[in-house]
Amino acid sequence: MQTIQTINELKQIIALNNAKTIGFVPTMGYLHEGHQALLNKARKDNDIVVASIFVNPAQFGPNEDLDRYPRDIERDTQLATDAGVDVLFIPSANEMYPFESDINIIVGDLSTKLCGESRPGHFDGVLKVITKLFHLIQPTKAYFGQKDAQQLAIIETFVDAYNFPVQIVRVPTVREPDGLAKSSRNVFLSETERGEAVHLYQALQLATVTWETTDDLTAAIAKGREHIESNTSGKIDYLEALSYPDLKPVTGETKEVLFATAVFFEKARLIDNILT
Ligand code: PAF
């Protein structure tokens, strides 16, 4: 595996690529089994696998956990090597954003729902870095976890709308044996909170089943919320059902429904979802 830090090195490697397929896995590091699933899929599907580790300042708000975001480059490098990554790109913030620019990508309505409501500018920052990485790496396929369903919806829509020559591959959420979605932020949970966190997925399952059996979305959401409220000390940011990928109210025409939740614990905000 080649580990590189600069755009110049990356450009040289990509220029030497002889029409081989490139699978790209963008990450912010502190890799876990969720990332491993993305890397394994990319390895299976492509000739070359490129992964990036970059804690992207553009997608963190002023009061968010940029400085606290967990980092372990040594372990990540080992994990990437074991997963068969060919090129690991670990740029600095200065390398990615060498100068201030007021030309920005602004996500519209899709970013005002769910996580976007409490994280203004977050998805603009995600698209900023993804655009740069896609231009630099020129991947055939790029791999994203379903756990970040709103991010996935926005990236799928963006790539489609602006004809990026890349196929977005959706990879199912990887869970702990008790159902908790794997996340780099799980390390911030206290022991008690870790025990409670399993109820996010259970609440989503309860809401989904209630909706499927009664067709009553309001009752389904209420049941899900009540489950979290009575089984955790967390504060619900949202628990909602929207159409996927346009994140609009569910109607009779809706093909895919996204049940999604975000819950604040003391030191971590956890998200989870079910797409049905
Ligand atoms: O999902 C993430 O880890 C990040 O949002 C991404 C896609 C790597 C962009 O920084």
Image (cartoon, rainbow, N blue to C red):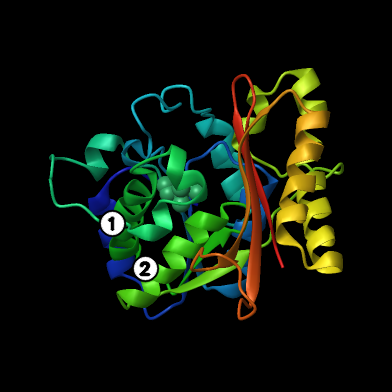
| x then y, percent, for residue 163 | 32, 78
Res 36 visible: yes
Q: In this view, does 135 lie above or below 206?
A: below
Q: Look at label 2 and name its amino acid.
A: Phe
Horizontal side of residue 216 vs 160, given as left or right? right
Q: Is mark 2 on a helix, strand or loop?
A: helix
The structure residue drawn at horizontal position 86% and vertical position 41%, both measured from the top left corner, is 178
Label ID, residue 158: 2
Q: Quadrant of residue 266?
A: top right
Which class describes the residues within 10 Å of circle 1: few (<14), some (14-19), or many (20+)? few
The structure residue drawn at horizontal position 33% and vertical position 35%, both measured from the top left corner, is 57
Q: Quadrant of residue 210?
A: bottom right
| x then y, percent, for residue 230 | 82, 30
Gap between marks 1 and 2 measured at Cα: 14 Å
Q: Quadrant of residue 250?
A: bottom right
| x then y, percent, for residue 109 | 37, 59
To which residue does mark 1 refer? 132
Q: Is mark 1 on a helix, strand or loop?
A: helix
Horizontal side of residue 191 vs 83, given as left or right? right
**Nearer-N-terminus badge (1/2):** 1
* 122 or 72, nearer to the observer: 122
The structure residue drawn at horizontal position 60% and vertical position 27%, both measured from the top left corner, is 268
